[in-house]
Image (tube, rainbow, N blue to C red):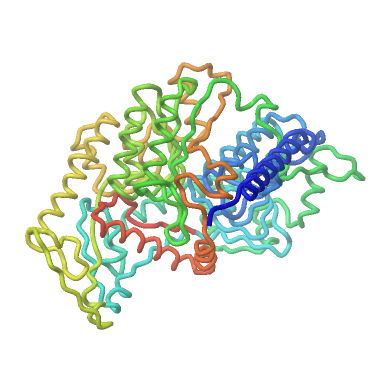
Amino acid sequence: MAMSNTKKAFLIIGGLLLVAVLVGIIGFALIFESMGRPTVARNSVLVLKVSGDLPDYAPEDPTAKLLGINQPQSFSSLLTQIRKAKVDNRIGGIVLDINFPGIGWGKADELRDAVKDFRNSGKPVYAYMQIGTNKEYYIATSAEKIFLPPAGDLYVNGFAANVMFYRGSLDKLGIEPQFLKIGKYKNAPDQYTEKSMTEPHREVIDAILNEYFGRMTQAIADERKKSLEDVKAIIDEAPYHADDALKIGLIDGAAYRDQVYDEMKNRLGYKEEDELRTVSASDYREIPSDSLGLNNGEKVAVIYASGAINLGRSSQGPFSGDALGSDTIVDAVNQAAEDTSIKAIVLRVDSPGGSSLASDLMWHALEEAKAKKPVVVSMSDVAASGGYYISCNANKIVAEPSTVTGSIGVFMGKPVMKGFYDWIGISSEYVMMGKNAGIFRETSKWEGTELEKMQKQIEKIYFTDFVPKVAKGRNKSDEEVNTLGQGRVWTGTQAKENGLVDEIGGLEKAIEIAKQLANLPADKDVRRVAFPTPRPFFETIFGGGEENTTTEEQRAQAALVKAMPEDIRRSFRYAAMLDQMKQGQAMLLLPFELEVK
């Protein structure tokens, strides 16, 4: 039935009124935004919570902020608050409230450097932990003083790396994993094909743990004024209750939070009767960087490339986790390259790798961009395999000492499901036209010509694509790269020694180098323009655009996955990767998901 003109008119008028109301709300919010900004009293203390999920970058939507919707804290935002506080003469010091942050050791190094840089201003930093393990304490050692509550504990009892293997479960299910790989150390398939570590696998993990242990013990020795031998002996006797940690000089006080604030009052010269003036990170984020003389001047694009590499758009799924989409990054790189107001590009990589094809598409976009302006890579916690592929052609590569990188190798495989199907009573038949039409059958292994074809596929990816591109980007021969490759994982320190990385440092170091390459004044700040551009707030609410909005089903899945143990979540992520390989994608992926505690 056709709609009457009266109904049409009401709908049009109603729609216009709704738009007018929304515009009015935003308008009023804009008017009162500056009035609503928090005031920061002189000699205030910035309290930074270093806890929970800290993604490398989370865009802050201005509209959502104006409407009072909480914005997630990210690691880049945390570093920004420290940069601002250093030059803000209203901030007298910082209290780090450290409570199991979801960051790796590369970010821990970067955070320590940021805290030390802040302390160069002469302002104090105190660290407070209720319970401290290796990583929390490592971060805390960058502070002037460290505190635990009287009932707190310190678990600085050495390093342990946990690697899970699924072969036993697959055998019970009748699933046979078949993988082809290039690289002695390309051990990612081992999680499916083995029940324990191979010697190359163990060799790499031992090397990483040795590097991490050495860095932590040296940091403790330097900051707590002890010998390395004493520190190692202390670690062997851990864990410690707060009073014991105080006696041996690992902390400066067994005190409650209010008592720590009193200590800071004394440090900053407050009168005894005065209350400590504090400002939270969420409030301090409302203070624009440019009001403090930061984040202004010429533009430098910072492109955040976080997550496992896939074809298509970047996304976040309850089972697959963060997905770094080639289409999203290629678009971001092209936009930054074409924008003449942007003088340099910094690619911030936090990825274990993934699809070889998606990696190559991003590599090509960066190669084209490099012909127009400098491209510098900043490696975060991990930039391995495909994450190194997209980094290797940059003008300069910067990594933290504890960054996990390298892993130049490739693998491809599929699960052979026949035993499982037989077990549950499923049968299948294939009708094929073409000699290799059944190459992706789930019920049979690659054999004969199929096996030959797939072996040639991964050899071409490694020897024709990956190795030569690294060789060109790093000014090395193919033979040198192949020797450093073989799937071998390196720390940032080791990668620099081997010429896979140029400089040690974090995002600030990468921006400094980008300024030099773009011939920008060293003594002037730059305006950081973040890519990919976030979706507009109302698009996320009402739909539209290329990415799908989150459905009720996805939210329910996310809640279910969040309730699962991390080991189970990890297995789902690997199952999603197997689905990609069933489509014929070769993988440039970190040989293991390393969890160091």
Q: Is residue 167 above or below residue 376?
A: below
Tally of numbered tags: 0
Residue 179 location, quadrant: bottom left
Q: Is residue 326 above or below residue 318?
A: above
Q: Is residue 10 above or below residue 347?
A: below
Residue 315, percent across and down? 45, 50
485 vs 466, nearest the viewer: 466
Looking at the image, the residue that sits furthest to the right is 273
> Do we see residue 119 in this rendering?
yes
Q: Is residue 39 left or right of residue 373?
A: right
Residue 23, percent across and down? 69, 38
Residue drawn at x 80%, y 53% is 259
Residue drawn at x 28%, y 62% is 190
Q: Is residue 548 above or below residue 430?
A: above
Residue drawn at x 16%, y 47% is 459
Residue 233, percent across and down? 53, 58
Residue 398 location, quadrant: top left
> Do we see residue 140 in this rendering?
no
Q: Is residue 261 left or right of residue 482?
A: right
171 vs 246, nearest the viewer: 171
Residue 592, percent across and down? 35, 57
270 vs 78, nearest the viewer: 78
41 vs 541, nearest the viewer: 541
